[in-house]
Image (cartoon, rainbow, N blue to C red):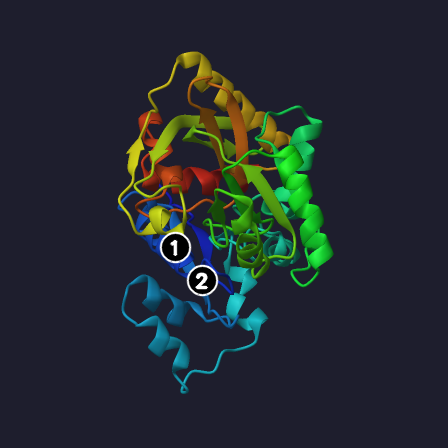
Amino acid sequence: MGSISKKCVGLIFGGKSNEHFVSITSAQAIFRALNSKQNKKFFNLKTFYISREGKWFSHERSILILKNKLNIKEFELEETYKPKNLIEILNVKEIDVWFPILHGFNGEDGTIQGLLKFTQKPFISSGILGSAICMDKITSKLLFANLKIPQVNYLPLQNYDPNNTNELQNIIKKVNAKLNFPLFIKPSNSGSSLGISKINNIKELPIALKKAWEIDKRIIIEEGLNVRELECGIIGKNNLHPSEVGEVECKSEWYDYESKYELENKLTIPALIDKNIRDQIQTFAIEGCKALNVEVFARVDFFLEKGTNKIYLNEINTIPGFTDKSMFPLLWKPLGLDIDQLVAKLINIVIES
C-alpha cells in the first residue's frame, strides 16, 4: 500500500486588525486540530504570522507563537530578526490550501482573499465579494432588505463627520422620527463588537457616534429589542449546510467585546426553541449566505424577539472565531463533528470543489 499524499495547509494569523489577539487564539486551536493523531496523517502545516504593524513572519518564527514559545511583544521587538520578502516567506509552491484565520480588517473584508487569489491556490474563506459585503453592515443590510429578510429597524450613516453640528442635528431628528430606544450605535466595518455602544436616550448619541467613528466613518444605528441571541453556522461550497442553532446568554448587559472573550457566558447548544423556529433560522442562514455570496464557512447571527418570537437576521461573520469559547466550532458537535473533524472537513471542501 502506498504512502498517503499529505496536503500542506498554509495557516495565516495575527494581522493588522483590532482583533489581532483573537486571531492568534483561533489559530492556536486550529494548530492543535491539525496536529491531532488523525489529521497528522493527512495534513502538513505551514504557519505565517502577521504582526500588528503588518509585518509577515516565516513559518519557523510563526510556529513558535502557536506553541506558546515566545512572548509576542518581545517577538515583535526583536532586532535580530529581519522579515524577508513577502513572496519568499509565503513559499507558494509548498502550499496546497490556505487557511486565513484573520478576523476583522484585512481578514474578513476581502483583502487577504484578493492576495491569496493571486497564488492560484484554494483558500478556506468566502471570496472577495462575499467577504467585503458581509464586513460592511450597511451594504449587507441593504441587500437583506431587498430580499425581504427580516431585520431590526436601522438608520445608515454614510461618511459621518463628527465636526459637522448641522449633520448631527439632522441625525437626531431622523433617530427621533424613525427609531425607538434603546439603540445600538455600530461602525459599519468592525468585528467582535468593537466600537459599539448601547444608548438609552438621545443625549448619549454624540459620544456613541464618536466612538464608532474612531473605527469607521460609516456608521449604523439599530433599534435594540428585547431579544434572545441565536447563532447558526454554515459550511459548504456549491451546497450550503446549516449547523445546529445555539443560544448565547450574556453575563453583561449585551454581547460586547468583554463578554465575547473575557466573561463566561452561557452557551446552550441546541438552543431551547421550537423546531419551527430552528428550521426558519437555518433556512434564513442559507438564504442570507447565498444572497451575499458567502461560502465555505460562516456564522450567521440572529435575534429572536421575546414575546413575539419574531426572527431577525443580525449579521454574517465570514471568518468566525475558533477559540475555545467560540460558538462556531461548538455548533457542529451535536452533528458529530468535533473541532478536529471540522477543520479537516473545511480543508476538504475547498480542495475537492
Residue most extreme to the bottom: 80
Apparent side of residue 204 relative to residue 249 in the rendered image (left or right): right
Q: Residue 253's x, y, as percent?
A: 36, 41
Report helix, strand or loop for mark 2: strand
Kind of residue at badge 2: Gly
- Residue under the point 45% across and 17% down: 277
**Residue that carries the numbered disc 1 in the rendered image:** 27
Q: Residue 27's x, y, as percent?
A: 39, 55
**Does residue 130 appear in the picture of this structure?**
no
Q: CA distance from mark 2 to mark 1?
A: 8 Å
Q: Residue 1's x, y, as percent?
A: 35, 41
Viewer-closest of 9 and 228: 228
Hey, which quadrant is residue 272 in on the image? top left
> Is residue 289 shown above or below 1?
above
Tell me whether circle 2 and circle 1 mark residues in contact (CB < 8 Å): yes
> Is residue 42 shown above or below 152?
below
- Residue under the point 44% across and 61% down: 20
| Quarter of the picture holding the C terminus | top right
Hey, which quadrant is residue 126 in on the image? top right
**Does residue 249 appear in the picture of this structure?**
yes
Kind of residue at badge 1: Ala
**Residue that carries the numbered disc 2 in the rendered image:** 14
